Image: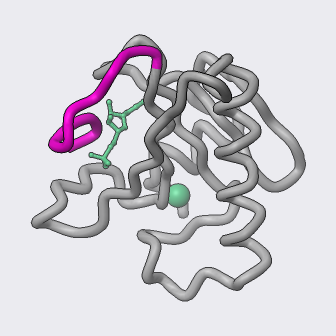
């Protein structure tokens, strides 16, 4: 996707504060963090959202990568929240699937990331 900001981050065309990368996924710090830890994990392949026909192995790899990122960020014991905003009502703003990995302080039921 030529016009997708997260595809450009995955391709290294837009800078990001990288937390983890392998051949299939990349994780980077959210530009506008809502929590002490707020990292995004994306597949390098473009899917607009979680219901965009993501193959099972890609989905599994992505979520295991999110758990790995939580470990890297030191959240394994304290806990963390994974969020995947999907569509208008969820206020998805970037249309390349991404998992928000949030933690580092107690969260209430409504946030983050919404
Ligand atoms: P969502 O509302 O679930 O689509 O979340 C999109 C997230 O992407 C927001 O938390 C933004 O702060 C974040 N974001 C947008 N552009 C960038 C960027 N260039 N680098 C890092 N995070 C970004
Ligand atoms: Zn994309």
| Region of the chain picked out in magenta, as a range | 104-114
In the displayed image of the protein, which residue is found farthest to the front?
Answer: 77
Residue 83 placement (x, y as % from top left): 40, 50
Which residue shows up at 77% across the image and 62% down it? 61
**Front-lying residue, 45 or 3:** 45
Left or right relative to 102: residue 110: left
Q: Residue furthest left?
A: 89
Q: Whole-percent x and y of residue 1?
A: 54, 63
Whether the magenta-drawn stretch holds residue 90 is answered as no
Q: Position of residue 5 (x, y in %)?
A: 46, 44
Residue 107 is covered by the magenta coloring: yes
- Is 107 above or below relative to 4? above
| Residue 111 placement, left or right of 13 | left
Where is residue 92, by image quadrant?
Answer: bottom left
Count of numbered circles on the image: 0
At x 61%, y 81%, the residue is 54
Question: In the rendered image, which quarter contains the C terminus?
Answer: top left
Please give the name of the residue rendered at 50% of the width and 49% of the height, measured from the top-left corner.
99
């Amino acid at each position: 996707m030529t016009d997708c900001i997260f595809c450009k981050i995955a391709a290294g065309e837009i800078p990001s504060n990288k937390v983890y990368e392998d051949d299939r996924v990349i994780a980077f710090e959210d530009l506008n963090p809502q929590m002490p830890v707020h990292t995004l994990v994306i597949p390098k392949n473009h899917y607009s959202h979680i219901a965009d026909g993501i193959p099972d192995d890609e989905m599994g790899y992505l979520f295991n990568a999110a758990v790995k990122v939580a470990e890297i960020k030191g959240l394994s014991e304290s806990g963390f929240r994974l969020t995947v905003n999907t569509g208008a009502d969820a206020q998805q703003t970037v249309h390349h699937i991404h998992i928000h990995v949030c933690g580092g302080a107690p969260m209430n039921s409504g946030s983050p990331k919404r």
